[in-house]
Image (cartoon, grey):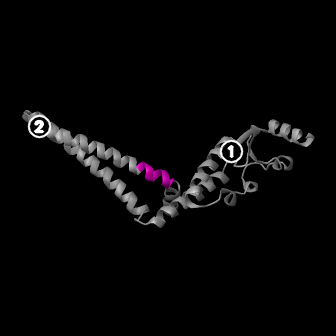
Amino acid sequence: MTKSSEYMEAFFGVELNQKFEDMINELRDVEESLKELSKDIAKLGTNLGPDEMKESIKELRAISYENAQQIKDVRTFLDFYLKSDKTSTHIILERDAYMKIYQIFKWDGADVRDLKRWIKELRELCDKIGLNVRDLINFKKLTAQPVPDDLVKFPVYAFDKQGYCLTGPAFDMVMHIDEVREKIAENSQA
């Protein structure tokens, strides 16, 4: 793999929306650690022996350096991806949406529940940026096996290797192919 493709893989292999949340949580951890550090520094004013004092100072230095490194990592991440620009957030969410679409179209057909979950995640991203999931997904283009015509009309959007189908108006129901065919038969008799 070339260096450029490794960089692209690293860039596009991360869900940035989740990464932003992770960075905020990391800052919260640093905040708590700094509060504890402050309490430990206050203890240095008590009567500690020379060896205890040296050991405490060594530990406190290590903790403060680790906190500084965590803050630097968060700052570097935010500087690289966010650039303090509101349009960056929109662009990042769009990028995450298109990465989710890519994941959906690479679905291996093993378990339709994976596909259902990914579509739900895509819908949540689309709701944030004003896109419509139906405009972004063409189920006929999925890499999994094509849905037979009689099932498409139900509608079934995709099915997995065990015969479970993705259906429902919001692509949010899973039914076995036998259940779908029973429903089709019931509807045709009515």
Can residue 42 be seen?
yes
Residue holding disc 1: 172
At x 43% / y 48%, what residue is drawn? Answer: 22
Q: Earlier in the sequence, mark 2 or mark 1?
A: 2
> Where is 156 relative to 82, above or below?
above
At x 24% / y 40%, what residue is drawn? Answer: 36
- Start and end of the magenta stretch? 14-22
Image position of 70 (left or right of 53)? right
Question: Element at badge 2?
Answer: helix
Residue 85: percent from left, percent from top = 43, 66
Q: Nearer the viewer, residue 48 or 135?
A: 135
Can residue 2 be seen?
no
CA separation, marks 2 and 1?
Answer: 61 Å
Residue 77: percent from left, percent from top = 39, 57
- Disc 1: CA contacts within 10 A as few (<14), some (14-19) or many (>=20): some
Question: Element at badge 1?
Answer: loop
Name the amino acid type tagged 1: Asp
At x 7% / y 33%, what residue is drawn? Answer: 47
At x 29% / y 42%, what residue is drawn? Answer: 32
> Where is 90 relative to 170, above or below?
below
Residue 16: percent from left, percent from top = 49, 55
Residue holding disc 2: 53
Q: Nearer the viewer, residue 189 or 133?
A: 189
Q: Nearer the viewer, residue 6 or 66?
A: 66
Image position of 84 (left or right of 117)? left
| Image quadrant occupied by the C terminus | top right
